[in-house]
Each structure stands twice: as structure tokens, then as C-alpha cells.
């Protein structure tokens, strides 16, 4: 079973994403391990009614200098941002800090459950948009699946989802869009006019 339904991912894909220049921006990083496209870096902007995914970088064995350069390119284009990064690579995180980027370390053991529930809410309530040109994000999210116990399967497709999860921790859905949750809870028929459980709404 997919972690996020394909139809919701398709709905999130947009030709253009509008946002204010002063909008909060965050970069999520999953350093991954050895393997194809094990590194994923993603930039998201908190627009008025959604979070927009504007940039993604995938790679294998990418040198920290190249990563730092890409982040500085994004800084010049978008302005200041925070970095929420997988804490499993302390050297790389320290290098980013020394390069001038504020880094929040994400302990997956502590944040993974919250992170994927948070991610699920953004898709379920249509509060996330992804630039259509970033088709690799769509493809990897559609291929990201859960095992028979409901746990996300760690494979090549997990890196995009993990980077997105890290980035969205900066924007907790319950704080950013509390009215969506309130309306859902007050709707006796549940979300979209049918009875649904939290698991179905959150896709986790």
C-alpha cells in the first residue's frame, strides 16, 4: 500500500507556485547511505495557503562543497532559510553550519512517526503543492510504500519522502492549519463526506 495515494500526489503537482518574498523557507535533507540517489535535498516555501516545493537535488556520493554551493545558489534565489537535516551525518551537518547555514538536526527515531503523520495531513488536506517540473518527486513518492505492518519501506524511494518529512517538520500542520483539523473533527461524516479513521486520513 502506498504511503500517500497517487491521486493526491497528482493533485499537488502545479505548473507555478506563488509565494511572498518574505515567506518562511526551509530545506530538508536526507543524507541517506551508500547507493543510488541516496542524498536528497529539498526546498519548500510556506505560501499563504500551502507549502510549495520549489527545488530538489538528488545525488550519490556528492561532495559537501557541491552541496554547499547548491544551497548558496538557493539562498541567492529565494533568500534566507533554515535547514532541517537528518542527524546521522554529523560531519556534513557541521560543515553546513560552518558555511553559514542554521541547521536543525532531525533524529529519525524521535521524529519519524510525527513526521510522516504531518506529511500525510499536508496531502490529505491539499495544503502542499509541488512544481510540475520536479517529476522525480512525484515518481518517488508514488513508489514509496508501506509493508504489511504499516511501516514505510526503506529503499531508494524513501529518500525523497524523508527529505520532505524533515522539511515539513518546520511547518507542523496542526499549528499551520488548525482550522482544517477543526472542520474535519466537526464533520460527522468525516473527511470528504465519508467515515474515515485517522490512519486513512494520515496514510500512516
Image (cartoon, rainbow, N blue to C red):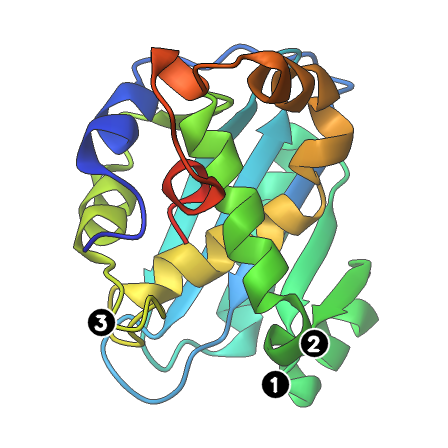
Residue bearing mark 2: 93
Q: Position of residue 173 (x, y in %)?
A: 66, 34
Residue 99 in sight from this viewpoint: no
Judging from the image, what secondary structure is the residue with disc 1 in? Answer: loop
Q: Identify the residue at image location x=61%, y=22%.
A: 185
Residue 16 drawn above or below residue 39:
above
- Give the camera-side residue of 45 and 95: 45
Relative to 62, is 69 on the left or the right? Answer: right
Instruction: Please state the total of marks drawn on the protein image.
Output: 3
Q: Identify the residue at image location x=45%, y=20%.
A: 190
Q: Identify the residue at image location x=68%, y=88%.
A: 91
Q: Are marks 2 and 1 in contact (CB under 8 Å)?
A: yes
**Mark number, residue 89:** 1
Quadrant containing the N terminus is bottom left
Q: Identify the residue at image location x=62%, y=79%.
A: 109
- Give the camera-side residue of 184 and 133: 184
Q: Position of residue 97 (x, y in %)?
A: 80, 69
Judging from the image, what secondary structure is the residue with disc 3 in? Answer: loop
Residue 199 drawn above or below residue 148:
above
Q: First in sequence, mark 2 or 3: give its number.
A: 2
- Give the camera-side residue of 17 and 175: 175
Give the class, few, some or many, for how many residues have Cα within 10 Å of label 2's Cα (few <14, many ≥20).
many
Residue bearing mark 3: 148
On the image, which quarter does residue 124 sit in? top left
Q: How far separated are the C-alphas under marks 2 and 3? A: 34 Å
Q: Position of residue 10 (x, y in %)?
A: 22, 26
Residue 142 in sight from this viewpoint: yes
Q: First in sequence, mark 3 or 1: give its number.
A: 1
Amino acid at each position: 500500500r502506498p504511503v500517500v495515494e497517487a491521486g493526491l500526489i497528482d493533485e499537488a503537482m502545479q505548473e507555478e507556485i506563488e509565494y511572498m518574498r518574505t515567506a518562511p523557507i526551509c530545506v530538508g535533507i536526507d543524507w541517506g547511505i551508500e547507493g543510488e540517489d541516496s542524498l536528497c535535498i529539498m526546498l519548500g516555501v510556506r505560501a499563504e495557503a500551502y507549502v510549495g516545493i520549489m527545488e530538489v537535488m538528488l545525488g550519490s556520493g556528492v561532495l559537501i562543497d557541491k552541496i554547499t554551493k547548491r544551497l548558496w545558489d538557493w539562498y541567492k534565489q529565494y533568500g534566507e532559510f533554515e535547514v532541517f537535516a537528518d542527524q546521522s551525518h554529523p560531519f556534513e551537518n557541521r560543515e553546513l553550519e560552518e558555511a553559514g547555514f542554521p541547521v536543525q538536526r532531525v533524529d529519525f527515531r524521535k521524529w519519524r512517526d510525527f513526521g510522516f503523520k504531518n506529511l500525510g495531513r499536508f496531502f490529505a488536506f491539499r495544503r502542499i503543492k509541488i512544481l510540475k517540473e520536479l517529476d522525480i518527486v512525484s515518481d518517488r513518492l508514488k513508489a514509496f510504500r508501506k509493508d504489511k505492518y504499516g511501516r514505510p519501506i526503506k529503499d531508494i524511494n524513501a529518500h525523497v519522502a524523508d527529505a520532505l518529512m524533515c522539511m515539513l517538520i518546520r511547518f507542523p500542520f496542526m499549528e499551520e492549519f488548525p482550522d482544517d483539523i477543526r472542520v474535519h473533527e466537526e464533520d460527522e461524516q468525516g473527511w470528504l463526506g465519508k467515515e474515515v479513521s485517522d490512519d486513512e486520513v494520515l496514510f500512516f
